[in-house]
Image (cartoon, rainbow, N blue to C red):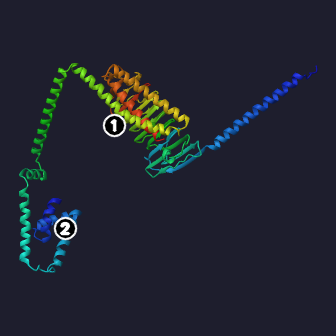
Amino acid sequence: MKTRFTFAHIEMFRFNLRAQFLIVASLLVIATMCVATASAQQKMSKRYPVSKNVRVVLKNITGTIVVESWDRNEIKLTAILESPKANLSPRHDGDGFTVDVMSDNRGRADVGHINFRLQVPAYSEVDLETKMGNITVTNIRGRLVRAHVSSEGDIELTGISASHVYAKNRIGDIFFDGEFVRDGEYHLQSGKGNINIRIPANSAFSLTAAAPNKQIHIGEFWNNGFKSMGDGRKFVGNVGGGQSEVVVTNFQGSITFMRR
Amino acid sequence: MNCEKCTDLISDFVDGSLSPEERNTLSQHLDECLSCADVRSDLHSIISFCQSQRGQYEAPPNDKALWLRIRNVIEADALAPAATPATTRSWTAWIGKTWELSFPQLAAATAAIVLVVALSTAVGFRRWQSSGVNSVGGPAMQSLSVTTETLRGRISQQQHAINYWNQRVEYNKARWSPQMRETFDRNLKVIDDTVNASFENLSRDPHDEVSEEMLNAALNEKLSLLKEFAEL
């Protein structure tokens, strides 16, 4: 039986052709945009020889910060700069390494996002600040870990064994997974978000935890020595002899302790 | 041998009038102490300069008249302090005195200060209590109003600082990206919500310490958020 091509067949064929053309054209446009965006971004990668307990200071405006430890006495800085106008001038001597996006770009209107990845010696002191963006710090054993987000951004500190830890954001979660070192100080504060603390079962610390919405979960670390204030909005007490000081404040979110 | 003792003996040492034992002890100290060694060398320089210049100055033409003038000046200086009132002298002498107290003297002075402070505190506290009992609302009402007033005062003080930084933020805000402006506003609202909630709690119960702490913390947060964004 012969197939007869009618006018309807021809129209369908034309429609298919038009549709295929449109799909291909859209893909081309998307690909071009991706290439343009990628070429507008700048990537900077550099290594700096430092001492094993170097103090790393990074002050960003917006963008993510990831800090990881590695087994070398050098820092590897990788930065992806969204705007080609942005300027980065890291300063370093043997004991200190500083990147200050704010002062490097003073007077420039908008430097856009800068995403940082830093690989640093495990015993470094790490002091990180950003106006907006997530901060992640992994496996740092130096004296200090400070992560400060002026506005929105999650803070994730994992594998931390520092004696002084300060984590603060205004909107966003804070996750601390590490240990409280004897005589250490740990201050975690969020304006709106959840604060989760994961520590070994044998941790010893004195705790002051305050959350006006009463969402304070001390979990397995609870004991009868804890004093509740303000009808459960604040708890003060010692766990395992209280050898380090832990202060956790959350204005509009929960505080949860978990055993590792 | 310490430096003080060394300073006392160094002049005799330079003159050579010390006993051999003292001389040895002092020499040992001078070998170890740089500052005392410097004093010795200075003294040597002065003495040798004086010795080298001896006899090179001409005698004054009328030495009797010179000595008379010197004596007049000394006598005039000696009479001048006598003209000042006795109280002033005693005060200046008292202030100028070097206070070297023994341990028992120091302990007695400390005990006396502690006693005076404790007594004045007790008297002050009793007066404050008695005035509270006599007042219309009683001590509880008074302390409540004091707490509220203190809180209001503190908030108003902080409000001045907040207003200042807010102006700076508003001035710079136009330069920010729309995303940054939205983020800032959202964050400010979170803090303002906490301030308002704490303030409401405090107006219901002015003795709510947790709300007071939260209010203080939130106000500080507001201030630091404004400061941090003002620099953008």
Percent position of residue A148, x then y: 45, 37
Percent position of residue A30, x then y: 69, 35
Q: Secondary structure at mark 2?
A: helix
Q: How many marks?
A: 2
The residue where tag 2 is placed is B40
Q: Residue furthest front?
A: B83
The residue where tag 1 is placed is A183
Q: Nearer the viewer, mark 1 or mark 2?
A: 2
Percent position of residue A222, x then y: 36, 23
Question: In which chain is the residue bearing label 2?
Answer: B
- Quarter of the N terminus of chain A within the rendering: top right
**Vertical arrangement, residue A254 with respect to residue B168, above or below:** above
Q: Is residue B134 visible?
A: yes
Question: In which chain is the residue bearing label 1?
Answer: A
Q: CA distance from mark 1 to mark 2?
A: 51 Å
What amino acid type should be assigned to the residue bearing mark 2? Arg
Residue at 7% x, 52% y is B85
What amino acid type should be assigned to the residue bearing mark 1? Asp
**Vertical arrangement, residue B37 with respect to residue A162, above or below:** below
Q: Is residue A130 visible?
A: no
Q: Dividing the picture into quarters, in which one does residue A31 lie?
A: top right
Residue at 15% x, 59% y is B4
Residue at 19% x, 67% y is B40
Left or right for A246, reference B63: right
Q: Dividing the picture into quarters, in which one does residue B209 lie?
A: top left
